[in-house]
Image: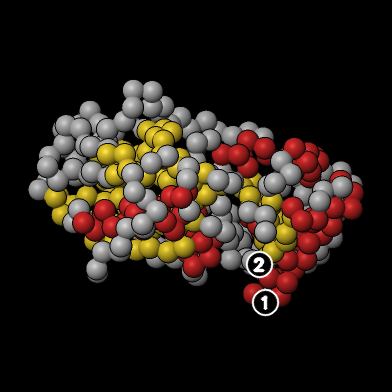
Amino acid sequence: MPAMRRPRCLLVVLIITAMALPAQALDLRWPEGARLAAAGAPALAGFTIATGPFENGRVPTRSVEGVLSEQIWQVEGAASDPLVLLRLLREQLEDGGFEIDFTCAARACGGFDFRHALPIAVSGDMFVDLTDFHYLAASRDDPDGRTHLALTVSRGGTTGFAHLAVVTPPGDLPPGLLAAPEEVLEIEVVPATSLADLLETEGRAVLEDLSFDIGAASLSGARYDSLTTLAAYLAANPTTGVVLVGHTDAQGGLETNIRLSRARAQAVRRYLIEELDVAAAQVEAEGIGYLAPRESNATPEGREANRRVEVVIATLPG
């Protein structure tokens, strides 16, 4: 595949060189205005890489093992555009001998189902807009075996975000995969406990206290702490939008369940707007039926867990 032309707007770059690795080590140039926000210490581990988009209820993946190193970059300026940043890095990867195994963007990937099927950094330093992200998986043959990498780029406001995971063949643990400033922070995964925490760290959350009767779209309770919390979060973040995504169990046909799941999401949207004074422009409602279960539909408990509405962070139009 021919290399893409580097965007003319990116004239000055920071040179990031590899440390204590062979000549084949990864050497990427990041654009001016880029900042290494977090880096995990290299360690022997496994990592899951997508090999195709979300379809038929799953994301096809490949599990690779070796020395895993992860970084999160934040980018300001012209290269904060995810497509510009992807093109800049993709050209360098191809020039460095990497083969592009798979790449996709947002809806073509499968949206939130794709993003949340993969280990894309759970960290306050990383943001993934589920309507505006790009994913790239690549690999190359090195002297000790095959090196794999996964790159996710997105944007929040005027800041671009990139999560880079590289798995090199196992061997002696290197002190570092990529050069990093002394003040680099290690990624620390802290389980989120509140709805606001989940929205900030993972970009999504299940509205656990909502309840729907079988086959019904109307809310069956009078008070919902999750919706009160969500309304307060949106009021405190007026430039943030969310999509309410309805889900059903697997009883009945797909089209019927998609309509039902959308109706449930719309019921939650009406409640937020009419009862809790949430701005209508901040909330959209969609439904995907039974295509993304979180439990088995073989048991009553699993079907009940699958009848839910999730809230997903999204970019406001305009």
Q: Is residue 124 left or right of residue 149?
A: right
* Helix, strand or loop under label 2: loop
Whether residue 193 can be seen here:
yes
Q: Give the residue type at disc 1.
A: Glu
Q: Is residue 3 above or below residue 226?
A: below
**Observer-nearest residue: 237 or 308?**
237
* Label 2 crowd bin: few (<14), some (14–19), many (20+), radius 10 Å: many
Residue 109 image label: none
**Observer-nearest residue: 122 or 90?**
90
Q: Give the residue type at disc 2.
A: Gly
> Which residue in the protein does label 1 denote?
255
* Helix, strand or loop under label 1: helix
> Which residue in the protein does label 2 denote?
289
Which tag, 1 or 2, sits closer to the chain's start? Answer: 1
Q: CA distance from mark 1 to mark 2?
A: 8 Å
Tell me if label 1 and label 2 are in contact, CB under 8 Å.
yes
